[in-house]
Image (cartoon, rainbow, N blue to C red):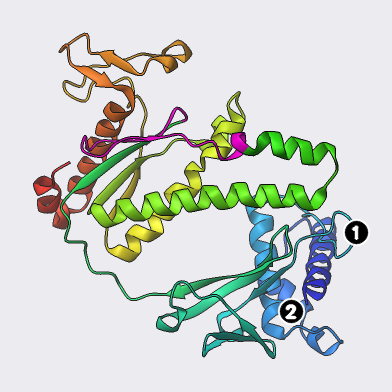
Amino acid sequence: MAREVNFVWNYCNELSLKIFLRERRFASGIELQRYLNGASKEGLGIGSAVFQQIAEEYATRRKQHRKVKLRWRKSGGARRSLGWIPFKARSVVWRNGQVRFQGLHLGVWDSYGLAGYELGAGTISEDSRGRWYMNVSVKAKPAQRSESKRQLGIDLGLKTFAGFSDEQLPNVEAQRFYRDLEPALATAQRARKKRRVKAIHARIANRRKDFLHQLSTRLVREYGAIFVGNVNAQALARARHGKSVLDAGWSSFRTMLQYKCADAGVWFDEVDEAFSSQTCSCCGSRTGPKGVAGLGIREWTCGACDRTHDRDRNAARNILAVGRDRLAGGIPALSAHSAAAVG
């Protein structure tokens, strides 16, 4: 089935390019769908709903990448594309612990209790080790507000993965998921052991994901509002600390916090962290260490009020203050909750 999906994707890719060269415009997803009408009767083993979803996904990704033509999806060879099968909500049915899709009954390890949700659109995708996963959006019931009045500011960094505004909560040191296995990975790559290389990459990703899930779940359970700094991971990854930035998984952590907070009724916001490490959280004076030279300074004393700060915890307190201001100013109904909260 993945081979047929690749064929349709490549057809959309070629068709979109021809339309652009001829008319100097981009074909929409709906327009591409018209060209695919009746294609399910031409011997391809995928239904019309899958055809429509492929066209929509293609148009969306082309717009995201701002390119006239995207990469071809290859079904064979050493550089073949990993399996990917998109589907619409009406294409899948959940019944007795199985997903019914295109006449197939797929056993799914259900760790979320899918029977309690209405399934939406999604994909069935393959990883580098040949394992298949179902990624699906669901319609969940509105979550009740968390009863916790505790609020938390989080500063993400490289030396310390997460600095917290709450002094009772120890800061979390940066993990070394990639660095710890880098020697073994280099050995496998030199020996050209492809399966071993894939296994090591999967182990790195699984360790990182497990760490992020455990930490994000614990924070969501304990706090009623969480504010995190908007550190730009992509920009920093292009700099000298690229490996460390990508290994940290900041973006994944923020994403986990966002959807877990939404599910648990916890307020979540991503706020501007500009100058949070340089500004004194007590008096507001910008007397902290600055520039590249100041990155190694983990503790500093404010020149205006003589208060000594831990670099990461001070930044987290400033992030919390910005988040509280946004919460109280933008949403009046939550002002009382914000004012009564304790950090």
Please tell me which residue is depicted at 40% across the width and 60% down the height of the picture: 259
Q: Which callout, 1 or 2, points at the residue further toward the start of the chain?
A: 2
Magenta-highlighted residues: 158-180
Q: Is residue 24 left or right of residue 92?
A: right
Q: Nearer the viewer, residue 296 or 237?
A: 296
Q: Nearer the viewer, residue 326 or 162?
A: 162
Which circle marks residue 217 in the picture?
Answer: none
Judge whether 36 appears above or below 18 on screen. Answer: below
Crowding at label 2, few (<14), some or many (≥20) Cα neighbours within 10 Å? few
The residue that disc 1 covers is 77
Judge whether 153 appears above or below 211 on screen. Answer: above
Q: Which amino acid is tagged 2?
A: Arg
Q: Which amino acid is tagged 1?
A: Gly
| Residue 125, position as x, y percentages in the image | 67, 67
The residue that disc 2 covers is 34
Q: Quadrant of the N terminus?
A: bottom right
Q: Is residue 311 left or right of residue 16?
A: left
Q: Is residue 180 left or right of residue 175?
A: right
Please tell me which residue is depicted at 61% across the width and 85% down the height of the picture: 91
Q: In the image, is residue 43 part of the stretch drawn in magenta?
A: no
| Residue 199, position as x, y percentages in the image | 70, 52
| Residue 136, position as x, y percentages in the image | 54, 72
Q: Nearer the viewer, residue 55 or 241?
A: 241
How many marks the image carries: the answer is 2
| Residue 123, position as x, y percentages in the image | 63, 71
Please tell me which residue is depicted at 38% across the width and 49% down the height of the picture: 215
The residues bearing labels 1 and 2 have C-alpha atoms spaced at a distance of 31 Å
- Label 1 sits on a secondary structure element that is loop
